[in-house]
Image (spheres, rainbow, N blue to C red):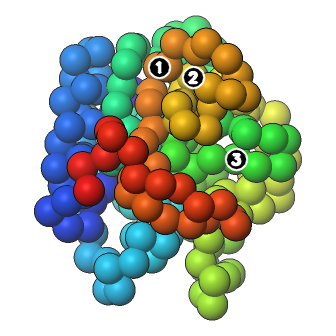
Amino acid sequence: MKVCTYYTDARYEEMARRMLESAKAVGLKGIAYQAENPTGDWKTGDGMKPAMVVQAIKDNPGDSILFVDADCTFRSYPSLLDEATHDYEFAAYYDTPELIYSTVTWFRAGAGLRYAERWLEEWRKMPEKPNDVGALVSAISSMRPRSVLHLPSSYCWCEELGRHRFGPVQPVIEHYAVGEHSFGGNNYAKTKNTIF
């Protein structure tokens, strides 16, 4: 299993470096891709995710790919994703049965490519309003896969959003939801853990 992420500028490059160092600390190898964000807007940058995942899978055909946003940190080894323990083809954190977070997604070597390519295909259908989360939900629901692992909240843990919902959880992968931004009608403040 190889960890993959991408960055669009020096700020995100620093986060990607920090995330990959945390992956290495728990025994995982990783790679970061640089991508050009034409607008500089975080939503545009986020929308590059499906294409970056497809590229990572094609560049590393013998490895399962664990895509992790650059603004995350590994707290422990993600044992649920160890290929020796299961036969799943795709894994992600489902906040609800209809909402799949694209922050942390796992694609099995070989079989996982079709999931990533369908994700990119669905994303391209919404050029006026690119939405990587909506495209991922559409992709997975249209495929009706039988080999999907629903990860627990500890694999996409955001302290500010999760603690009051799930109580005391030991994070495996912690997500900091970088900076101040709004998404889905919710406004998120900058936290003490973010770089900017």
Determine the secondary structure under disc 1: loop
Q: Which mark is residue 154?
A: 2
Disc 3 + disc 2, Cβ < 8 Å: no
Q: Which of pointers 3 and 1 lies earlier in the amino acid sequence?
A: 3
Q: Which mark is residue 151?
A: none
Q: Compute the Cα span from label 3 to label 2.
A: 14 Å
Residue 4 visible to an observer of this rendering: no
Q: Measured from the top left, where is residue 45 in percent x and y?
A: 40, 70
Which residue is found at the position 68% from the left and 81% from the top?
A: 125
Question: Left or right of 94: which side holds 106?
Answer: left
Residue linked to disc 1: 172
Disc 1 + disc 2, Cβ < 8 Å: yes
Residue linked to disc 3: 100
**Could you tell me the amino acid type at mark 3?**
Ile
143 vs 11, nearest the viewer: 11
Q: Which of pointers 3 and 2 lies earlier in the amino acid sequence?
A: 3
Residue 41, image quadrant: bottom left
Which quadrant does the C terminus fall into? Answer: bottom left
Determine the secondary structure under disc 2: helix
Q: Residues within 10 Å of mark 1 (few under 14, many from 20)?
A: some
Question: Left or right of 165: which side holds 54?
Answer: left
Mark whose residue sits in front, 3 or 2: 2
Which residue is found at the position 40% from the left and 14% from the top?
A: 77
Q: Compute the Cα span from label 3 to label 1.
A: 18 Å
Which residue is found at the position 22% from the left and 17% from the top?
A: 25
**Could you tell me the amino acid type at mark 1?**
Val
